[in-house]
Amino acid sequence: MPAIPPTDILEVMRHVPHRYPFVLVDRVDGGESGEWLRATKHVSMDAPYFVATSGDSAPVMPPTLIVEALAQAGGILCFFSGLLKPRGGSTTFLAAVDHTRFVRDTHAGETLTLDCRLKRALRGVIRIEGRAAVGDDTVVETVLTMVVRDTEPELAAHDPRNAP
């Protein structure tokens, strides 16, 4: 299988329809097409989800957003694995989250490593095992079910991935 090259945020944004503040993958570190992908998310204090935090406790990234970051990394893995049409012709939708285990909090200033492994892809239904970690410490483990759907031509024309 071909290798997935390291990519920056601009390349990431060519493969996910999300935009600030909801793009939750900062870069792709590498991977193998049809097998696995490793990505990075830097948890920054100026993220919008920290606005509501106050008091003496350290700001914590909402765990559901970590699962969403794994889903976005999984969508990038699907693209590089040839499961999506290019240029917004199809997209992935998160259909189910199973066997999720939240192990520890993630605080502002930490860097999440997002590991996704493609377990099965059949008729547009994809199963991905995801693990988010800070260093060697597991933060979240989950199994995601994603579905691939073609994008309506008129919607694909306005897809942010088609911007110059």
Image: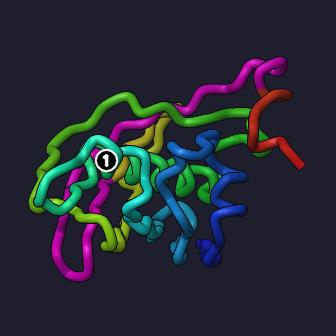
Q: Which of the 4 image quadrants contains residue 42?
A: bottom left
Residue 85 in the image: state x and y as whole percent: 73, 41
- Judge by depth and name the residue closer to the eye, 9 or 92: 9
Q: Describe residue 60's horizontal placement relative to residue 4 as left or right.
A: left
Circle 1 SS class: helix
Q: Quadrant of residue 81?
A: bottom right
- Label 1 Cα neighbours within 10 Å, binned few <14 / some 14-19 / many ≥20: many
What secondary structure is the magenta-colored segment mainly? Answer: strand
The relative height of residue 75 versus residue 116 in the rendered view (above or below) is above
Give left or right: position of 127 versus 75.
left
Considering depth in this image, is 98 or 15 the residue closer to the camera? 15
Q: Which residue carries the number 1 mark?
A: 67
Q: For the residue marked with disc 1, what is the amino acid?
A: Val
Residue at 59% across, 41% down: 18
Q: Is residue 54 left or right of residue 92?
A: left
Is 8 on the left or on the right of 75, as rendered?
right
What range is drawn magenta here? Answer: 129-155
Q: Residue at x 67, y 26 (%)?
A: 150
Number of marks: 1
**Location of residue 53 with respect to 118 vertically, above or below:** above
Q: Position of residue 101 (x, y in %)?
A: 12, 51
